[in-house]
Image (cartoon, rainbow, N blue to C red):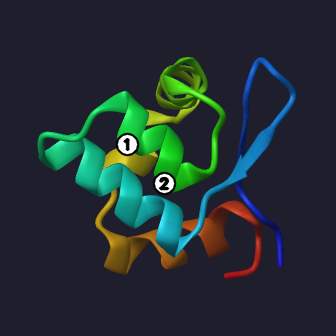
Amino acid sequence: MCELVVRLGSGKEVPIDESTLSIVYKYIRSEYTLEELARDLGLENWEEAYDFIKRLPAWIAWTPSSFFEYTKRRICGEA
């Protein structure tokens, strides 16, 4: 199974899975600071969190979680 990742400018890779998506959804839909986002994603500071948000494809952020696994399988050629 392939894994979707977001590569940051610092060289870190953040895997996109259900737990990451739930954190991103929380950030988008509520009052959630970049510092909190960095802490929850295991990043060093708010600047890395900002870089993550900049590099995250918008379609991932707005895809419902129930549809994400299906879309991920299609991208990876597993469907």
> Residue at coordinates 58% horizontally, 68% vertically from top-left?
17
- Label 2 SS: helix
Task: Report if residue 57 is visible in the image.
Answer: yes
Tell me if mark 1 has few (under 14), some (14-19) or many (20+) residues whose alpha carbon lies within 10 angstroms of its own. Answer: some
Please name the residue shown 73% across and 27% down the image. 8
Quarter occupied by the N terminus: bottom right
Q: Is residue 57 above or below residue 50?
A: below
Q: Position of residue 31 (x, y in %)?
A: 13, 40
- Residue 78 in the image, given as x and y percentages of width and height: 75, 79
Is the residue under label 2 in contact with that under label 1 (CB below 8 Å)?
yes
Circle 1 is placed at which residue position? Answer: 36
Marks 1 and 2, how far apart in space?
A: 6 Å
Left of 34 or right of it: where is 11?
right
Residue corresponding to mark 2 = 40
Question: Where does residue 18 sit, x and y in percent of width and height?
Answer: 50, 73
Q: Residue at x 76, y 70 (%)?
A: 77
Label 2: few (<14), some (14–19) or many (≥20) C-alpha neighbours in 10 Å: some
From the viewer's perspective, is residue 56 above or below residue 5? above
Query: 26 or 56: which is nearer to us?
Result: 26
User: What is the quadrant of the C terminus in the image?
Assistant: bottom right
The residue at the point 44 percent across, 49 percent down is 60
Q: Nearer the viewer, residue 58 or 36?
A: 36
Q: Quadrant of residue 44?
A: top right
Residue type pointed to by label 1: Glu
Residue at the far left in the pictured view: 30
Give the amino acid type for the residue marked by disc 2 in the picture.
Asp
